[in-house]
Image (cartoon, rainbow, N blue to C red):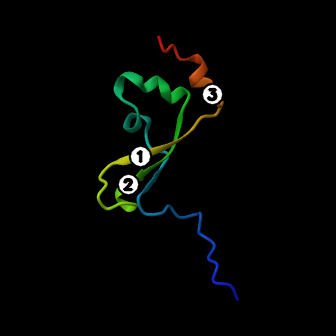
Amino acid sequence: MSDYHTPDFTKVPTGILPFPPVEDVFVADQLELANHLHPLFSLDISTVNPAGADMIVMFYEPIEGLVLFTFDYS
C-alpha cells in the first residue's frame, strides 16, 4: 500500500479564488488587458507565508506573446 495521496481536484483549496473578476485583477484604465490575459486564479499569499497580506494572480495567455508583440512600449 502506498502513502501517495491523489489530490481531489473537484475542491478548491483554501486561499485560492478561481477565475477572479477582471475588475478585481486589472486597474480601471487597463481593463482592455482582459481581452488578452485571462485570470485563472488568485492566491492569498498569507496561505503560503503568514507575513504576506496580498493576492497574486496567475494568468493564462491564450496566444503566447500576443500582448508582447502588439503593445506599443514607446
Q: Earlier in the sequence, mark 1 or mark 3?
A: 1
Task: Kindly identify the residue that appears in the image at 57 percent across and 24 percent down.
Answer: 67
Between residue 33 and residue 47, name the one nearer to us: 47
Tell me the SS state at disc 1: strand
Q: Nearer the viewer, residue 55 or 52?
A: 52
Q: Residue 35, how many percent across, how many down? A: 54, 26
Residue placed under numbered mark 3 in the picture? 65
Residue 4 position, x and y percent, is 64, 78
Q: Secondary structure at mark 2?
A: helix
Kindly report the distance in space between the C-alpha atoms of the residues bearing marks 1 and 3.
21 Å
Residue for badge 1: 56
Residue 42 falls left or right of residue 54: right
**Residue at the spot x=50%, y=61% of the render?**
12
Mark 3, Cα crowd under 10 Å, few <14 / some 14-19 / many 20+, is few
Numbered tag placed on residue 45 in the rendering: 2
For image coordinates 41% across by 46% down, the residue present is: 56
Q: Which badge, 3 or 2, is on the more N-terminal residue?
A: 2
Asked whether the residues under the numbered discs 3 and 2 touch, taking CB atoms below 8 Å apart as contact, a structural biologist would say no
Q: CA distance from mark 1 to mark 2?
A: 7 Å
Q: Position of residue 36 (x, y in %)?
A: 56, 28
Residue positioned most to the top:
74
> Secondary structure beneath disc 3?
loop
Kindly identify the residue that appears in the image at 35 percent across and 26 percent down. Answer: 28
Q: Kindly indicate whether the residue at mark 2 contacts the one at mark 1 (C-beta within 8 angstroms).
A: yes
Q: Could you tell me the amino acid type at mark 3?
A: Gly
